[in-house]
Image: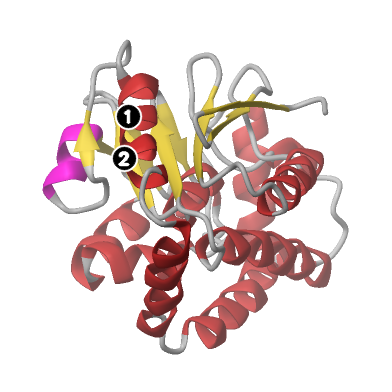
Amino acid sequence: MDFIQIEVENKVALVTIVRPPANALSKLLIKELDETFSFIEDEPDIHVIVVCGEGRFFAAGADIIEFVKVESGEAFTEIAKATQSFFNRIEQGSKPVIAAIHGAALGGGLELALACHIRLATEDAKLGLPELNLGIIPGFGGTQRLPRLIGKAKALELMLTGEPVSGKEALDIGLINAIHSKENLIDEAKILALKIAEKSELTTRMVLELMKYQETNLKEGLNQEALLFGQAFESENGKEGIQAFIEKRKPMFK
């Protein structure tokens, strides 16, 4: 694979995203992640998964440059649905997934982390959904999972302002489970994963299965999010926001 590395030790798989400079979630990267999870799901000796990013970031967002090549709102809706489907697979899978976040988890990067069962981060990490700054909306599950995790009011604040929170504030609002230093983040994630991996795999699967009953109407909400995601990209402001991002200037929304 071009963008994914896997290390397996003590029933724990460390999945590392490697796509410099920002680990942006391109179509191919998502495909490789999907293939990685297919492999892991079929491996009886892997009980827990840790997802992290190499370099300066966990994942700084979706690949906006790649979005420019998409020709219609309907195509954007299909991109959203395909990525949502993979993130649903993570969340509804039978093996616990821990996100180890450093640097930044923004946009699609945070949406990936939200699909994981447990999130750890460094104190100075930046977590947010800045899509409205580009004249678009979160499309990979953010509008549905973030309010379920931290409450509607705070989730709306983060989405409507586009402002990220630090790892420390993310802990305070319940967005992450714990803070660790950058030097110890992966080791601490492995320690937590090992504690889980030592439990009965059967009962771990049962607990994850029961969590699905908390997601009432998630499917309906994700479907509507994908439709509006396509409409946002097709709008004048969506085109302006993306062009401004590429040109590194402030967008002029109408």
**CA distance for labels 1 and 2:** 6 Å
Of the 4 image quadrants, the one containing the N terminus is top right
Task: Reply above or below: 120 against 22.
Answer: below
| Residue 121 drawn in magenta | no
| Element carrying mark 2 | helix
| Element carrying mark 1 | helix
Task: Reply above or below: 25 against 188.
Answer: below
Q: To which quarter of the image does residue 155 belong?
A: bottom left
- Which portion, as a residue range, is magenta? 167-172
**Left or right, residue 40 beside residue 156:** right
Instruction: Look at 74% across and 27% down and name the residue there.
Output: 3
Mark 1 belongs to which amino acid?
A: Ile
Q: At which x and y percent is residue 84?
A: 63, 65
Q: Which mark is residue 100?
A: none
Cβ atoms at labels 1 and 2 below 8 Å apart: yes
Q: Which mark is residue 191?
A: 1
What's the colour scheme?
Answer: secondary structure
Q: Main secondary structure of the magenta part?
A: helix
Task: Reply above or below: 63 against 181.
Answer: below
Q: At which x and y percent is residue 147?
A: 31, 69
Of the 4 image quadrants, the one containing the C terminus is bottom right
Mark 2 belongs to which amino acid?
A: Lys
Say few, some or many: other residues with alpha carbon within 10 Å of mark 2 (under 14 / 14 to 19 / 20 or more): few
Q: At which x and y percent is residue 38?
A: 74, 52
**Left or right, residue 184 beside residue 216:** left
Q: Which residue is mark 2?
A: 195
